[in-house]
Image: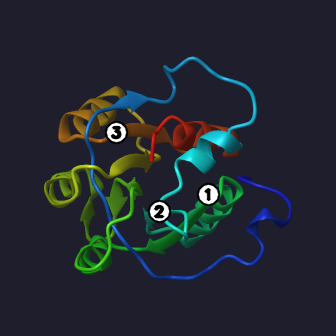
């Protein structure tokens, strides 16, 4: 349903990190842009390890899908399946990019944004959720999320979202 092919092979390291927010943009209202974003991704690399991302999502299949898409965009990603695990990671790592589900088993991602934002104001947070109403979007943007993406999403939407940031 979400992806095909070998891009989801060799995925699955469960570690973590966390992040934060500054401004916001809505991926569905941005004008679409075509073309190769590899130069954007290369310029966004930080250090020898490249760009790192943390995925906070309780559906492991979505974690694997996002990891594959991010790897395609030259971004290394780790994932956690709960806010409590994300909190532990915040103790020792701060990736420049976080994908945050809103409805997790131990709380709402929208309520977690301020914790991340306070600790890591430069981190970009992208909310991903199946609850894609205008009220959900407004609440997420008010909380400080940088970008809101409704599920289901495509590889193109995630790639466009990542390339919209200067990481």
- Residue depicted at 51% across the width and 21% down the height: 30
Of the image marks 3 and 2, the number of the one nearer the N terminus: 2
* Residue 138 in picture, x, y percent from top left: 26, 30
Which numbered tag is attached to residue 146? Answer: 3
Q: Is residue 143 left or right of residue 37?
A: left
Is residue 26 shown above or below 162?
Answer: above
Tag 1's secondary structure? helix
Mark 2 closeness class: few <14, some 14–19, many ≥20 residues within 10 Å? many
Q: Residue at x 23, y 40 (%)?
A: 144
Cα distance, mark 3 to mark 1? 17 Å
- Most extreme residue toward the right is 5
Secondary element at image label 3: loop
Q: Determine whether 144 is above or below 2 in the image.
A: above
Q: Residue at x 26, y 81 (%)?
A: 88
The crowding category of the residue bearing disc 1, from other C-alpha atoms within 10 Å (few below 14, some 14 to 19, many at least 20), is: many
- Earlier in the chain: of badge 3 and badge 1, it is 1
Which of the two residues, 49 or 12, is positioned nearer the viewer here? 49
Q: Secondary structure at mark 2?
A: strand
- Any part of residue 153 in sight: no
- Residue 2 picture location, percent across and down: 71, 52
* Label 1 sits on residue: 70
The location of residue 153, given as percent across then percent down, is: 60, 43
Where is residue 36 drawn, in percent x and y? 75, 36
Residue 121 seen anywhere in this rendered image of the structure: yes
Q: Is residue 117 left or right of residue 3?
A: left
In the picture, the disc for residue 131 is none
Q: Are marks 1 and 2 in contact (CB under 8 Å)?
A: yes
Compare residues 15 and 154 and report the one nearer the observer.
15
Residue that carries the numbered disc 2 in the rendered image: 53
């Amino acid at each position: 349903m979400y992806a095909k092919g070998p891009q989801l092979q060799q995925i699955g390291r469960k570690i973590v990190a966390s992040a934060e927010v500054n401004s916001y943009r809505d991926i569905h209202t941005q004008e679409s842009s075509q073309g190769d974003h590899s130069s954007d991704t290369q310029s966004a690399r930080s250090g020898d390890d490249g760009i790192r991302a943390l995925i906070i999502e309780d559906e492991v299949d979505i974690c694997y899908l996002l990891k594959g898409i991010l790897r395609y965009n030259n971004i290394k990603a780790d994932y956690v399946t709960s806010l409590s695990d994300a909190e532990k990671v915040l103790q020792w790592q701060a990736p420049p990019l976080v994908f945050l589900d809103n409805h997790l088993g131990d709380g709402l991602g929208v309520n977690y944004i301020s914790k991340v934002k306070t600790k890591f104001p430069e981190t970009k947070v992208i909310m991903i959720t199946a609850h894609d109403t205008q009220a959900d979007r407004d609440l997420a943007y008010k909380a400080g999320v940088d970008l809101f993406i409704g599920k289901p999403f495509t590889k193109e939407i995630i790639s466009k979202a990542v390339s919209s940031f200067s990481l």
